[in-house]
Image (cartoon, grey):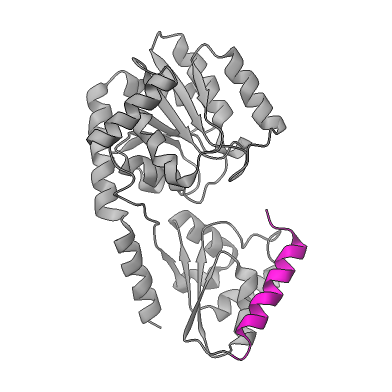
Amino acid sequence: MESEGSFKKYKKAVAAFLKGRSYDVIHIFNRPRLVLPVAEAVPGARIILSMHNDMFIPRKIDPEEGAKVIERVERIITVSNYVGRTIQAMYPQAAGKLRTVYSGVDLNRFSPAVTGKAREIRESLQKKYQLKGKKVILFVGRLSPKKGADILIEAAQILAKKDYKIALVLVGSKWYGENRRTAYVAYLQALAQRSQVPVVATEFVAPEEIHHWYWTGDIFVCPSQWQEPLARVLYEAMASGLPIVTTNRGGNPEVISGNGLVVENAEDPGELAEKISVLLDDPALCRQMGEKGRAFAERKFGWARVAREILVVWGNP
């Protein structure tokens, strides 16, 4: 996470780079505090702001500055309706400038494990980690309390009492590119050691290999505990043809439409276990949801669609 000092340095460097240059459109990503210095450096530019986090909350930006940012930008693109609603609740004057542009996924890389290569990788990983003959419940994400991996491990213990042949695979680390052992990671390790269900923890996986792990999964679980803007892993899971269980947090439910189940009480491992068991009990429903998810991704979440929608915003002042 960036410090105030590093942000000030970055802001100064951006303004210095832009000073004296001319641009028609400047598109700023997730840093509303860059809008005013950029506008001062290039006064004639149209400024578009993309938001994928709650960066307009008072602890992130002074409300007075926030109001000036809203006034200066031409359009605010958000990754979910949730993010747009949150901005509008704080700054009602933003209403006419907000537009949701859902993110995308590489539909070629993230795909169902039906081809020869994908099946080979699936079988290889399942053999290596002793997952053969088990339904694999997959989690992909950072290992932090707000992502809810501990709730998932607790839910797995409830499922263990029902004699399901399952395994839990946790793909991720504390932060991108590092495997530092935090107190929360240590807590997860302790839970895993006591687990009645086998738990495989991969630690950090490089982005170019992450799709291999989706091929090992049978059910994808995104147990977000915070108001998630909209988890990218949901796009990856649906493109990979996996049925999804996620929580009613932030923008996550916006991409669940016949391709998964939504847990209303995110902090309740019992409800999470109940939703997972619905899928474990019904292989046909699992398959149907996975197929719907892949079709949904192909129809709605390819990068070509994202590019078209961004071009519309750029081309329509």
Quadrant the C terminus occupies: bottom left
Position of 284 with respect to 153 (left or right) is left
Q: Residue at horizontal 44%, vertical 36%?
A: 246
Q: Residue at horizontal 58%, vertical 57%?
A: 54
Q: Residue at horizontal 55%, vertical 46%?
A: 227
Image quadrant of residue 279?
top left
Residue 81 lies, in percent from the top left, at: 44, 57
Residue 156 lies, in percent from the top left, at: 49, 19
Position of 143 with respect to 112 (left or right) is right
Question: Does 5 lie within the magenta span?
Answer: yes
Magenta segment's dominant SS is helix
- Can residue 136 be seen from the camera position used here? yes
Image position of 135 with respect to 67: above or below: above
- Total marks shown come to 0
Residue 195 lies, in percent from the top left, at: 55, 14
Image quadrant of residue 310?
bottom left
Question: Does 66 lie within the magenta span?
Answer: no
Q: Residue at horizontal 68%, vertical 61%?
A: 60
State the extent of the magenta-drawn residues as a range: 1-20
Position of 131 with respect to 156 (left or right) is left
Position of 187 with respect to 246 (left or right) is right
Image position of 55 with respect to 231: above or below: below
In the image, 27 versus 316, the foreground residue is 27
- Can residue 114 be seen from the camera position used here? no
Residue 64 lies, in percent from the top left, at: 69, 73
